[in-house]
Amino acid sequence: ETGVTQTPRHLVMGMTNKKSLKCEQHLGHNAMYWYKQSAKKPLELMFVYSLEERVENNSVPSRFSPECPNSSHLFLHLHTLQPEDSALYLCASSHQTSGGRVGNEQFFGPGTRLTVL
Amino acid sequence: AQSVTQPDIHITVSEGASLELRCNYSYGATPYLFWYVQSPGQGLQLLLKYFSGDTLVQGIKGFEAEFKRSQSSFNLRKPSVHWSDAAEYFCAVDLWGNTPLVFGKGTRLSVIA
């Protein structure tokens, strides 16, 4: 596998289900991101992990719970979702440095298309 | 508020015609600038990026973009569009060079014969 992979590619779940999205990067990066992409809305940054620590949480509802066990893996645990949470969930990774400007080129996975019934 | 604006929601061009997609940002400093492309059902792929230096940058698939500081713009261009270029295009900025990207709302490109 190369680049950033996401599983599953498609997921249909009921509002009472619990599921998890998985992301894996094979690029040696140290930062990973979850984005939500809904129709007619811009990409929304949900979570950022740098060096396996969460550094940003853009007021995402608690029904979304991220987990980053190591620099290569990122999960998004889902529970008690709402129909409006149906969207494409994109994972990305990049190389972060401790200082200085290097440009934050992010590499994206193909996404998980989530449908909440 | 700091933002990235892509004023065109949807553009249709004929195959072989030239293309320009607009992007403006509202930051005081010059950010790092990116263009990404997203084909249906896929993730985002980086087309090109600007960090510093020559304001005309070349990317993949025959795309180029020009940074104009005076206009706070970073427009994407292609001299001759192919049908396979039909996709969604996103402009993004990184203000400090080490921060999460801020994306525009995207421009959907349709290509007709």
Image: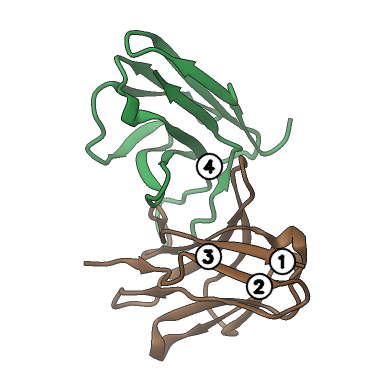
The answer for how far apart the CA atoms under marks 3 and 4 are is 15 Å
Q: The green chain is which one?
A: A
Which of the two discs, 4 and 2, sits closer to the camera? Answer: 2
Quarter holding the C terminus of chain B is: bottom right
Q: Which amino acid does label 4 sit on?
A: Ser
Q: Are marks 1 and 2 on the same chain?
A: yes
Which residue lies under the disc numbered 4?
A93
Q: Identify the chain drawn in brown.
A: B
Asked if badges 1 and 4 are on one and the same chain, I answer no
Q: Do the residues labelled 1 and 4 touch (CB within 8 Å)?
A: no
Residue B26 at x, y = what percent?
A: 31, 74
- How crowded is the residue under tag 2: few (<14 C-alpha within 10 Å), some, or many (20+)? some
Asked whether the beta carbons under mark 1 and mark 3 sit within 8 Å of each other, the answer is: no
Cα distance between the residues tagged 2 and 3: 22 Å
Residue labelled with disc 3: B34
Label number found at residue B112: 1
Q: Give the structural element (helix, strand or loop) at label 3.
A: strand
Mark 1 in CB contact with mark 2 (< 8 angstroms) = yes
- Pointer 2: what residue? B13
Q: In this view, does B20 lie above or below A53?
A: below
Counting residues from the start of the chain, the first of labels 1 and 2 encountered is 2
Q: Please, what secondary structure does the residue beneath circle 1 have? A: strand
Image colouring: by chain
Are discs 4 and 2 less than 8 Å apart at CB? no
